Image (spheres, grey):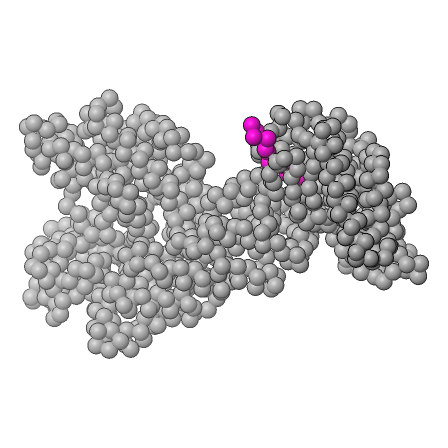
Amino acid sequence: MAEPTSVGVFLSSDVDLDVRLKVGGLYGRLPASHLTRDGRTELSVSFQLFSENQPLTTAISTTAALYQEGSVDWSETLFFPLKYRDLSAEAWLEIMVHDARDILRREVIGRAAFRLFDEKSSLRRGNQRMFLERTHGGVIAKEAASMKPSSQSLGDMGKIEARLKSYEQGEMPELDWLDKLTFRRIDEIQKAQRAAQFASGHLEIRVELPTFSAPVIFHEQTPLSSHNTKPQWDQLIWLIDSEVNLGLENPAERKHQKLTRSVARGVVDHDLKPNGEERRSLATAIALPPTRLLGAEHKALLWKFRFSLRTESGALTKFLKSVDWGDSEEARASIELMYQWAPIDPASALELLSPTFTDSEVRKYAVSVLSDAADDELLCYLLQLVQALRYESEDDSQLARFLVNRAVANPVLANFLHWYLVVEWEDPSFAPRSSHTHQLLEEACMTMGPKGEELWDSLRRQSELMAQLTAITRELSGMRGQPKKVERLRTILSDDGSCSELASFTRALPLPIDPTSNVSGIVPEESKVFKSALSPLKLAFRTTSNGRANMIFKKGDDLRQDQLCVQMISLMDRLLRRENLDLKLTPYRVLATGSDTGLIEFVPSQAVADILAEHKTLTRYIALNNPDPDGPYGCSHKSLMSFVKSCAGYCVITYILGVGDRHLDNLMLAPDGRMFHIDFGFIMGRDPKIFPPPMKLCKEMVEAMGGTESEYFGKFKTYCCEAYNILRKSVVLILNLFSLMADANIPDISQDCEKALLKLESKFALDLDDEAAMQHFQVLINESTNALFPQIFETTHRWAQYWR
C-alpha cells in the first residue's frame, strides 16, 4: 500500500488490498413463522458487491449460526476477490439475511445495502450498523436499483457511534480511566436500545470494515498514456473464442481461483465451516465417482474448507484433485495437510497411483496405505499395481520396492509378480520399467540366501516349462486330425519322447497358475488336445499328494482380457462373501504368460448347448447328477439352489462388466449345479450381436428354475438385487482397478478408455438409492427374459456350429 499523500489521505487507486469485512451479529425480533417452538432458528448472511446495478462479485456467505434470545453472532471475516483500487465511486454492498434451515429454499428474511464511499467520496471505515428491510414471503418489496443506504434517525446513540468511530480511527486522544467509564455506559445504552428494537420489531446487522491509518479518498486509476506504443502483456485484451477453446481452462475463472487461493493462504482460518448450501455442494463433490472430473466450483470449495474436511477420509482424493500442483507453495501446504488427514482405505489409495496424480509424495503416501493391507488383499490388486508402475517418475520407485519386498516374503505374491512383469516385456513402452522391476525381484531373492535362491529357481523353471509347452503346441498346430494330435502329444510326453522330462520333474514345481499347488510332472495318458484350430492342450499335472491338477495351455490367444475378467469375478465373489452372500461362483484361474500364451484352470463341466442337445432340459442334467425323488423337479434342493444362486451372481457380474457375445456354448454347467461363464472376448458393453439383452438369461435357464412365477425364480431375483446393491457399495474400488488398466493392452479398454469407464460407471446406477436400484435391476431381468433377438441369434449360432 502506498504512503499517504501530502494532505494526509490515501487514494483508493493506490490501495492494493482485497476488499474484506468482518460480520458481527444480528439483533432484533424475527417473525414467529421463522422460529421453532423454543424461539430458535439458523441464519446465514450473504454479501455481494455491485456497481451501477451490475454485480462485481458473486455472493459470499457466512456459515449458518444459531439465532436465540433476539440475536445471532457470526464473527466471521469474509474476503472478496476484488481490490479496493478496482472499486468505482458508486460501488455498494448488498446484504441478504437467509433462513438457513431449508437449504433448497434459503428464504430471505431481510435485506440492507450501503455505499462503500460516502457523500464526500471517502471509503467507509470501522463499525457499521444497518437496519434491515423486512421481506414478505421471502420477496423484497423494492428493486435492487432503488436500494439506498438507510438514513434512520438514531438519536443520541447515533451521535455516540459517530464519536466511537472517530475514537477507533485515532482521531480522539485516549484516556484510560475515562474510556472505561464511557465504554461501560455505551454498552448499557446499546442494550437498552436493542431491547427497544426487539419490542418494536426492528432488525439490525453490524459489520466491521477495515480501518486505515488515514482516510481513503476515491480516485480513478490513471489510464495508460497514448504515446506508449508497446503495450505490456498484462495490458493486452484477450478475446476468448468459446468454440475454439472448448474444454480448455477459462482464463477469467483461473484468475479468480488464483486470487481466492492467494487470499486463503494469507489468512488461514482452520475453523472455517461451510454453510448449508456449501455442505450440500461438498457432499456432491465427495460422492462423485473417481471417473468424474471436478468442476472449478467444487475445487474452490474443497480448497476453502480443506481444514474442516480433514476428518472425512473419503474427501482426501477429491481435495488432492483440487490442488494446483504447479504452485510450489500450494503443493507443499497440501502435502503437509495430506499427512494430517483421516486415514484412507486401500481402494482410495489405488486412485492416488493413477496417472492423474504425478506428485511423488502423493504416490509415496498411497504406497504407505497399501503397506497395511494383508497379502491376500494385496494379491487382489497386484495386477493393477504392476500397471501403476507405468506412471511412476523413475524405475527405482517406492512402489517398485514395496512390491518386491512383499513378494520375496510371500512365494505366491512373488509368483504372480514375476508373470505380471514378464508379460509386459513385449510392450515397448513398458518393457524397460518392467524389466528393471523384475531385476530388482531377482536381486532381492538372491540376497535372501538358500530360501530366496530356491524361489528364484522355481520361477526360472516355470518359464522353461512354458517355453516347452509353446514349442509342443506349435508342432501340433501343423498337424491334421485331432486323434493324431492327441497321440503325438502323449508320445512327446512319454519316457521315450522328446520332452520326457515333463512327465517327471526332478524336483516338485509350484504351478504358475496356482503356486500353492506343487506338481511333480504331467500324466501323458490323461492329457489331450482340444478340437480347435489353435490346438489347446489339456494337461493333467500330478500333484505331490498324487492328485490331479488339470490345466489348459493355449498358444495363439491373448488371455490378458480373460485374466482381468476372472480377477474381477474373483474380487466380486470376495466382496459378496464378506457380506455373507455366497452365490456359488466359479472364479477359475487364468494366467497370461505372454501376449499370446497362457494357462486356464480346467473345471469339469459341460456347455449348456451340449447339455440341451443331449438331455433336452437343464433340470434333467442336474437331476441325473444330483437325484432326489422328493426334491424340486427330481433334483436335490442343494443342487438347484446352487444353480439359482450361480445364475444370479453371473447375471449381475456380467451385466456390470458389460460381457458380450453370450451364447449357450460359453455358458457352462458343472455336475453339482453351478453355472458359470467362459470366454470373455467382449466386455465393457461391446457385443458382435445387435440389440443384445442386458444379461444372458435364456428361457432354458428360467425353465430350470420353474418358470417366471415359481418360488425359485423369485429367489433368483432376490439374490440378483441383493448382490447388485452390495457391489454398488464398492464402485470406487472397481472403477479404480479398471482405471489402472487403461494402458495395459486390454483391447476393450485401451480402444477408448474414457468411454469404457463411463459405461462401467453407468452400470452402477449411482443416482439411485438401494430400493430404486432393486426396482431398476428387476426391470433389466424382465427385459432379458423377454428379449426376442437372443433367441433368434441362438438358433443361428447352433446351425453355424452344426455345419462347422
**Direction from residue 576 to residue 263 in the image, left or right:** right
Q: Give the magenta-colored segment's residue range.
A: 36-46
Q: Name the quarter where the C terminus is drawn.
A: top left
At horizontal 80% and vertical 49% (from top left) the residue drawn is 182
Residue 33: percent from left, percent from top:
62, 25
For residue 112, say whether it is visible: no
Residue 378: percent from left, percent from top:
32, 58
Placement of 802 over or under 533, stated as above or below: above
Q: Nearer the viewer, residue 655 or 583?
A: 583
Per the image, is 43 magenta? yes
Placement of 729 over or under 15, stated as above or below: above
At horizontal 40% and vertical 39% (from top left) the residue drawn is 764
Q: Name the quarter where the N terminus is drawn.
A: bottom right
Residue 169: percent from left, percent from top:
82, 54
Q: Nearer the viewer, residue 421 or 773?
A: 773
Rendered image quadrant of residue 369: bottom left
At horizontal 38% and vertical 59% (from top left) the residue drawn is 370
**Direction from residue 694 to residue 452 in the image, left or right:** left
